[in-house]
Image (spheres, rainbow, N blue to C red):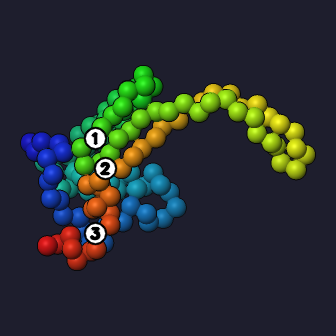
Amino acid sequence: MPKLGSGMNLEIPSDFSLNEGRNKSKSYQELLRLIAKSSDYNLYEVEDIMNHFVAHVQQLLRKGEIVKVSGLGVFKSSTIKPRTMPMGLIGEAKQIGETKTARFKPSTELTKAIRQQPDESSS
């Protein structure tokens, strides 16, 4: 079993696209199929692993932890302070309470991979 984050060089079919169609959940299913096809895991195992990954990241972010994923980036939660916002043309102010949100900062490795030209990735 390959070690996660070990810098595996995976071949992605040139006709593969996560952004086909309007339904974004289809992209998740396509990604699961791609992972299953390029690994020793079946589709159900891949989906189970991904669901556990997402659940644990959510749980850690709720606790205020920072989650670093090698080759992907850093997930963290941040607090947005309470504020007053004007509401449309009538100019009434509305109080918005403190909220928590998730933040993601891509790793340098991910940023470089995205910026690579298609012919550079094959060398």
Badge 3 amino acid: Gln
Residue at 15% x, 59% y is 9
Between 80 and 102, the residue placed more toward the observer is: 80
Badge 1 amino acid: Val
Label 1 and label 3: CA atoms lie apart by: 21 Å
Please say whether residue 53 is visible from this viewpoint.
yes
Give whichever of discs 2 and 3 has the lower sequence position.
2
Q: Which residue is mark 2?
A: 107
Between 41 and 68, the residue placed more toward the observer is: 68
Give whichever of discs 2 and 1 has the lower sequence position.
1
**Residue 12 locus on image (x, y percent):** 23, 64
Mark 2 and mark 1 residues within 8 Å of each other at the beta carbon: yes
Numbered mark located on residue 116 in the image:
3
119 with respect to 105 (left or right) = left
Which element carries disc 2, helix, strand or loop? loop
Between 66 and 118, the residue placed more toward the observer is: 66
Farthest residue to the bottom: give it. 119
**Residue 100 locus on image (x, y percent):** 55, 31
Badge 2 amino acid: Ser
Residue at 67% x, 29% y is 82
Numbered mark located on residue 69 in the image:
1
